Image (cartoon, rainbow, N blue to C red):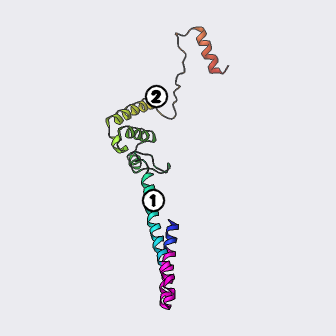
């Protein structure tokens, strides 16, 4: 488009020069007419180039984006993500809501209100609560997960193996 603007500007400058020279006498009438023709030709070229540019732009239109398309800048948050963070959702929950949104063709906010998401979130919360319930009662008490303790029902070989393991042998 810079070439088109430049050609139009040159044509206008030539037209202005031609009007000044017209006032000087009839000998410059031929120059004025030729410059006027050149200006008209440049304007016609400019219009043709603009039309061609519009054709190319309309032929190369990008595919319509899905409603839950990822942002162009991956570090930037979308409006829906920001709202979900404000509601207290974790990263994992927001990602799952975005997956549901892309499958169902709705916004992440609407996906977070869907039964599928609520059920998944309830299952995740129950798992998290079960994991947290295995923690000790306070920071001072400790629980050893998956480690056997000494019992009367142990065989002598099991007792000896557990004793050696605890003693670091």
Q: Which residue is mark 1?
A: 52
Position of the C terminus by quadrant: top right
Magenta span has 106? no
Q: Position of residue 62 (x, y in %)?
A: 44, 50
Q: What residue do we see at 34% from left, 34% from top?
A: 116
Q: What residue do we see at 34% from left, 42% from top?
A: 106
Looking at the picture, tell me which residue is in the foreground, 49 or 155. Answer: 49
Q: What residue do we see at 43% from left, 52% from top?
A: 59
Task: Tell me where residue 88 sits by quadrant.
Answer: top left
Q: Is residue 106 left or right of residue 128?
A: left
Q: Are marks 2 and 1 in contact (CB under 8 Å)?
A: no
Magenta stretch, overall SS = helix
Magenta segment, which residues?
A: 9-35
Magenta span has 14? yes
Looking at the picture, tell me which residue is in the foreground, 54 or 97. Answer: 54
Q: Position of residue 13 (x, y in %)?
A: 50, 79
Taking the view exactly as shown, the residue that stands out farthest to the right is: 169
| Secondary structure beneath label 1 | helix
Task: Tell me where residue 90 sits by quadrant.
Answer: top left
Q: Which residue is mark 2?
A: 134
Q: Position of residue 113 (x, y in %)?
A: 32, 40
């Amino acid at each position: 488009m810079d070439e088109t603007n430049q050609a139009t500007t040159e044509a206008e400058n030539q037209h202005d020069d031609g009007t000044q020279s017209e006032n000087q006498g009839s000998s410059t009438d031929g120059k004025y007419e030729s410059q006027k023709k050149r200006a008209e030709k440049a304007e016609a070229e400019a219009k043709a180039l603009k039309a061609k540019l519009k054709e190319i732009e309309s032929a190369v239109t990008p595919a319509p984006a899905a409603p839950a398309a990822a942002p162009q800048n991956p570090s930037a948050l979308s409006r829906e993500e920001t709202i979900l963070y404000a509601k207290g959702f974790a990263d994992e929950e927001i990602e799952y809501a975005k997956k549901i949104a892309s499958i169902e063709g709705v916004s992440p906010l609407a996906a977070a209100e869907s039964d599928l998401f609520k059920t998944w979130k309830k299952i995740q919360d129950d798992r998290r609560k079960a994991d947290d319930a295995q923690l000790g009662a306070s920071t001072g008490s400790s629980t050893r997960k998956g480690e056997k303790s000494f019992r009367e029902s142990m065989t002598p070989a099991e007792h000896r193996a557990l004793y050696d393991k605890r003693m670091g042998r």
